[in-house]
Each structure stands twice: as C-alpha cells, then as structure tokens.
C-alpha cells in the first residue's frame, strides 16, 4: 500500500460521488498521456506508461470509458433518465470508483496486482474498500439532497436540476484533474464540501421535523399542512398553507375549502399531506390510504380550478413574451409551474413522449419569432395554450378510462 495511491483513492470519492465514467475516463487519459503532470507518479513509469499501457490505460479501456462518459453527460441532462438512474446510481458509482482505483494502482505499481493476487492481505484490500464505501456514503448524501429538489420540482420546470447537472459535470472532471495534480489541495476541498453537505442535510431534516405538529387525537406527528391525521383521522383545526414549491409554510391556510386542492396540485395527499410517489392519476396514499381522484366530484373540481387559472396565466405570459429574448425563459417557467405542473405531475412520462416531441418541434419554430416586437407577445401564450390543451386532454382521458376500469 502506497501513501500516494491511498490519497488518490480517498480524494476520488468526491468526483465519483457525482459522476462515474467522466472521472474514470479522465484518470485513465491522464495516466496514459500526461503522467508528467502527476507529481506522485514515478519518473520511470512516466516514460513507460505510453509504451506499455496496463489494462486500465489500454486503448480499449479508454474507448469504453470515453463512450460511457459521453453517454453519462447526455443522460444526466434529461429529467426522465435522471429519475431512472436515481435507483441504480448509488451502486454504479462506487463500483467504477473501485475499478478506477485498482486501475491507478495497476498503472502506478505494475508489480502490485501480481503480488496482490498471490498474497492479498488486509492492507491491499482496505484502500479499495475505503474508496467503495466512501463513494457510496457521499453519493447517498448527494442523492438525498438532490431528492429534495426532485420532489418539489419533478419535471425541473425551474431548471435548477439542469444547472446542478452541469456543475456536477465540472466537479466530476476538473475535480479529478485537481486530485491528480494537487492531491492534498483536493483532499482539503473534499473535506469542506462533505462538511457543507452534511450541514445542509441536518438542516433540511430539522426543518421537516419542525414543520410537523402533534395530532390532537392520538399524538402522532403529522404534517402542519395536513387536513386530517393520517392515523386516527382527527381533523387538524388549523392547517398551514403550502408554498409555491409545495413546502409547509408558517402561516395558516387562508382558504380551507380550497386547501385540499392546493395540496394535490403540489402532489401531496389532500388528507394527510404526505407526498405521492407515483406519476399516476389513481393511486393510494402510503400514509393514510386515501385514494386519489376516486371521487369524481373532486376530480371535476380539480380540473375546473385549473381552467380558471388559464386566463390569468395567458395574460401574464403575454407580458413576459412582449420582452424580446429575455422574457422567454421566465415566461415559460411561469406557465409550466402554475398551469402545466399540477396536471403533468400525475401523467406517466411514457404517455406524453410523442406529444412532448411534437410540441418541441412546434415550439422551435415559434421561438424563432419571439424577438419580433409586439407580435412576439403572442409566442409564450400560444405555447402555454397548446401545452395546456394537450396535458388537459391526456389527464381527462386517463381519469375516465381508469374510472371505467375500476
Ligand atoms: Zn391522530
Ligand atoms: Zn394521505
């Protein structure tokens, strides 16, 4: 076990918690082509690395890592794919981190692998284990924090997740370069970043707990925004209102009649305010057993409430749209959050795949005219109206066909 590779392994936990194949690819590329920048790689190895590549820096390995890194960049830009990868990604990242660590060891110290296979001792397997467990821990922490954003804005209407994704590409690539060239500096940065993440997580957990209140009937901790207790069904005399992003606020809900609809708009149970997990219209609340949209009157009122928002949204998006170029992005975010999200949250992505691509092509042509003064004011309202009509009819069709089935 060498100190230099151990430091590399510890530091690699940072970039690998964000991306699997980007740091693997960059590590292999640098070990192969620019080993002179890696201070801790011995001089004799620097000369021979390019001539006699190990399995890790071989042409085939570089091609595989390269292809997977490109796929990773593309895949992490789509909310659909991100949601799928959230399940497997805590296992892929530690695995690739360990493979990369073993690769670095093999390239750095050619005798190591032979030695290790003959007399694999604790000191040889321990660093690899440390890399795997460390990546898993940091990756889980990151996933939990990202989950908070995904819960509040599943389709990334605001675009925060998209920005994060680019930031993580940069961290996954430049972080590993920094680690290879200045290992100690990277360790310090990693300790700071991990510390900040732990603090944010603690704060988020404490905030969630603080927003809960004791049920008057049975004493269970219930969400402040709940209309009834999930367990004994006692009513909550004063439910608190929910924010634009669906979080519980300190102030009481002004309109208790419409409060259940507001909860459903934010994808929370109209009874106990627990978040719904699935993208489906008819589903059962995991906490209180409430069956969503089972009551046709509730479903109808939900759609009517949605329709009454339309005129205001069209006027406001026209105002955004009147501002050439700059008004486009906030205008689109605005109508998607206020008008589309309450319906789209319950529609499976597969059902809208064709629709979304058709609409994208139409919007591409529309957006080209948005810079035109005055006439450009029509672009965002048309986009809002087309989108709303499409999602509303899909929502209606699902509501009716699933009612017939049940
Ligand atoms: Zn209760
Ligand atoms: Zn519930």
Image: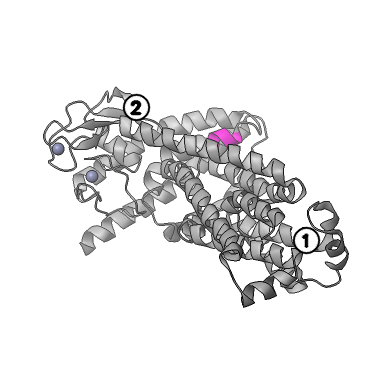
Q: How is the image coloured?
A: one colour
Question: Can you say whether 348 is above or below 307 in the image?
Answer: below
The residue under label 1 is 31
Q: Earlier in the sequence, mark 2 or mark 1?
A: 1
Q: Is residue 287 left or right of residue 148?
A: left
Within 8 Å of ligand 2, the CB of disc 2?
no
Q: Residue at x 31, y 53 (%)?
A: 281
Q: Residue furthest bottom?
A: 118
Quadrant placement of the N terminus: bottom right
- From the image, give the main secondary structure of the stretch colored magenta: helix
Question: Can you say whether 39 is above or below 196 in the image?
Answer: below
Work out whether residue 101 can be spotted: yes
* Picture coordinates of residue 161, whole percent (x, y): 54, 44
Q: Residue at x 47, y 43 (%)?
A: 145
Q: Is residue 307 left or right of residue 168?
A: left
Q: In the rendering, which numbered label is found on residue 249?
A: 2
Please name whichever residue, 70 or 245, is drawn nearer the observer in this view of the structure.
70
* Picture coordinates of residue 393, whole percent (x, y): 37, 52
Q: In the rendering, which numbered label is found on residue 15?
A: none
Q: Residue at x 50, y 42 (%)?
A: 157
* Picture coordinates of residue 321, whole percent (x, y): 58, 32
Please name whichever residue, 41 or 86, is drawn nearer the observer in this view of the structure.
41
Secondary element under disc 2, as helix, strand or loop, is strand
Secondary element under disc 1, as helix, strand or loop, is helix
Ligand number 1: quarter of image: top left
Q: How would you rate the neighbour count of disc 2 (Cα within 10 Å): few for under 14, some for 14-19, many for 20 or more?
A: some
Q: Start and end of the magenta stretch?
A: 328-332
* Picture coordinates of residue 42, whole percent (x, y): 82, 59
Q: Is residue 211 left or right of residue 389?
A: left
2 and 1 marks in contact (CB < 8 Å)? no
Quadrant placement of the C terminus: bottom left
């Amino acid at each position: 076990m060498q100190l230099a590779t151990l430091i590399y392994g510890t530091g690699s936990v940072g970039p690998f918690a964000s991306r699997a194949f980007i740091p693997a690819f960059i590590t292999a590329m640098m070990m192969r082509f620019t080993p002179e920048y890696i201070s801790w790689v011995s001089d004799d190895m620097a000369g021979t690395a390019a001539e006699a590549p190990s399995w890790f820096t071989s042409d085939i390995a570089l091609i595989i890592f390269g292809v997977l890194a490109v796929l990773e960049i593309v895949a992490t830009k789509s909310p659909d794919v991100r949601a799928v990868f959230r399940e497997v990604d805590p296992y892929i990242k530690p695995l690739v981190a360990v493979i990369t660590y073993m690769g670095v060891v093999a390239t750095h110290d050619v005798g190591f692998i032979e030695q290790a296979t003959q007399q694999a001792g604790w000191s040889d397997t321990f660093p690899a284990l440390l890399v795997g467990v460390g990546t898993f821990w940091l990756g889980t922490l990151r996933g939990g924090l990202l989950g908070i954003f995904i819960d509040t804005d599943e389709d990334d209407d605001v675009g925060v997740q998209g920005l994060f994704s680019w930031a993580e590409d940069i961290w996954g690539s430049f972080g590993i370069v920094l680690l290879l060239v200045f290992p100690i500096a990277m360790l310090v940065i990693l300790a700071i970043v991990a510390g900040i993440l732990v603090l944010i997580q603690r704060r988020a957990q404490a905030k969630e707990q603080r927003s809960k209140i004791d049920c008057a009937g049975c004493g269970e901790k219930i969400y402040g925004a709940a209309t009834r207790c999930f367990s004994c069904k006692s009513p909550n005399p004063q439910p608190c209102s929910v924010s634009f992003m669906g979080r519980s606020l300190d102030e009481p809900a002004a309109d208790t009649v419409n409060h259940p609809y507001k909860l459903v708009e934010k994808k929370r149970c109209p009874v106990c305010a627990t978040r719904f997990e699935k993208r489906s219209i008819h589903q059962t609340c995991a906490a209180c057993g409430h069956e969503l949209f089972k009551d046709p009157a509730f479903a109808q009122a939900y759609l009517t409430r949605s329709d009454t928002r339309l005129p205001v949204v069209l006027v406001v998006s026209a105002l955004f749209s009147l501002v050439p170029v700059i008004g486009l992005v906030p205008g689109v975010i605005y109508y998607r959050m206020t008008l589309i999200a309450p319906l789209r949250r319950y529609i499976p992505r597969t059902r809208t795949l064709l629709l979304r691509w058709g609409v994208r092509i139409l919007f591409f042509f529309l957006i080209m005219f948005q810079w035109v003064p005055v006439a450009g004011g029509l672009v965002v309202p048309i986009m809002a109206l087309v989108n709303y009509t499409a999602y509303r009819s899909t929502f209606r069709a699902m509501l009716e066909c699933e009612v017939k089935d049940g």
